[in-house]
Image (spheres, rainbow, N blue to C red):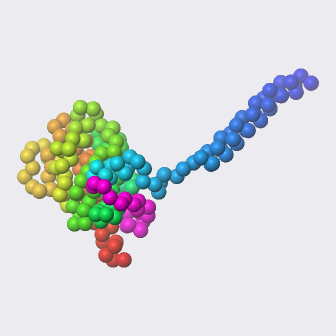
Amino acid sequence: MSALKKIKPVLVLSVICTLICALLIVTYNLTYVDTSGVLTDDLRAGCVKADGEGDYALVTDKAAAGLDGDEYKDIVKIVKNNTKNTFLFETVVDGYAADGIDAVIAISADGKVSGISIIALGETPGLGSKINDDAFLSRFVGAGSDITIVKTEPKNENEVQGVTGSTLSSKGMAKAVNLAVKAYSVMNKEVQTA
């Protein structure tokens, strides 16, 4: 009889834990909302800042767009502005911090950057955070080829002067822009060959 008294609290606690877990699973399944195919408020605000008002639609099939390779893993979402016929790419890239730059890059129909907005920035305040300044972001507008970050005044059209003291953050922004330009080029080729 004493062995049953010792085991009874353990059994009761196990049954209670099992019931609570089952209720949590049921609640999760009833309330879960899949946002992978949804244009979130933050992303929409980033699209509007980068490309103005428009009829935005999420492109959910990266494979059909030709962007399913590992080199495009930093592209989180693809959005089409049906009003302007532009594409926007949300990218999450490393700057000074790992995954420190979450940006939206708008690419016009001619394959050039038409606007940029930053959704989230995990870079060092006062240094890397300066890449969010409009003066810096506007340096990328019109880019249609691989951008290189330079420390001095740019001598070539594919060069952008980085933010002083924020080389890694500046290079991260250039990586995001280069990725968006390349992705648009690949998508454009996919559409032309289809």
Horizontally, is 31 left or right of 39 in the view? right
The structure residue drawn at horizontal position 37% and vertical position 63%, both measured from the top left corner, is 67
Quadrant in which the C terminus is drawn? bottom left
- Whether residue 93 is visible, yes or no, is no
Quadrant in which the N terminus is drawn? top right
Q: Position of residue 152 (x, y in %)?
A: 9, 44
Q: Position of residue 77 (x, y in %)?
A: 39, 55
Q: Is residue 8 above or below residue 143?
A: above
- Whether residue 11 is visible, yes or no, is yes
The structure residue drawn at horizontal position 30% and vertical position 71%, both measured from the top left corner, is 189
Residue 129 image-quadrant placement: top left
Q: Position of residue 61 (x, y in %)?
A: 44, 64
Pick whichever, 44 or 168, lies toward us.
Answer: 44
Count how many numbered circles sit on residues in the image: 0
Horizontally, is 172 left or right of 164 in the view? right
Question: Which residue of the protein is positioned furthest toward the top in this rendering?
Answer: 2
Residue 7 highlighted magenta (yes or no): no
Pick whichever, 18 or 89, lies toward us.
Answer: 89
The structure residue drawn at horizontal position 28% and vertical position 33%, both measured from the top left corner, is 124
Q: Position of residue 76 (x, y in %)?
A: 39, 53
The structure residue drawn at horizontal position 44% and vertical position 61%, both measured from the top left corner, is 60
Question: Which residue of the protein is positioned furthest toward the right in this rendering?
Answer: 1
Pick whichever, 129 or 166, lies toward us.
Answer: 129
Horizontally, is 28 left or right of 137 in the view? right
Report the magenta stretch's main SS. loop
Range of the magenta residues?
A: 51-70
Q: Is residue 100 above or below residue 91?
A: above
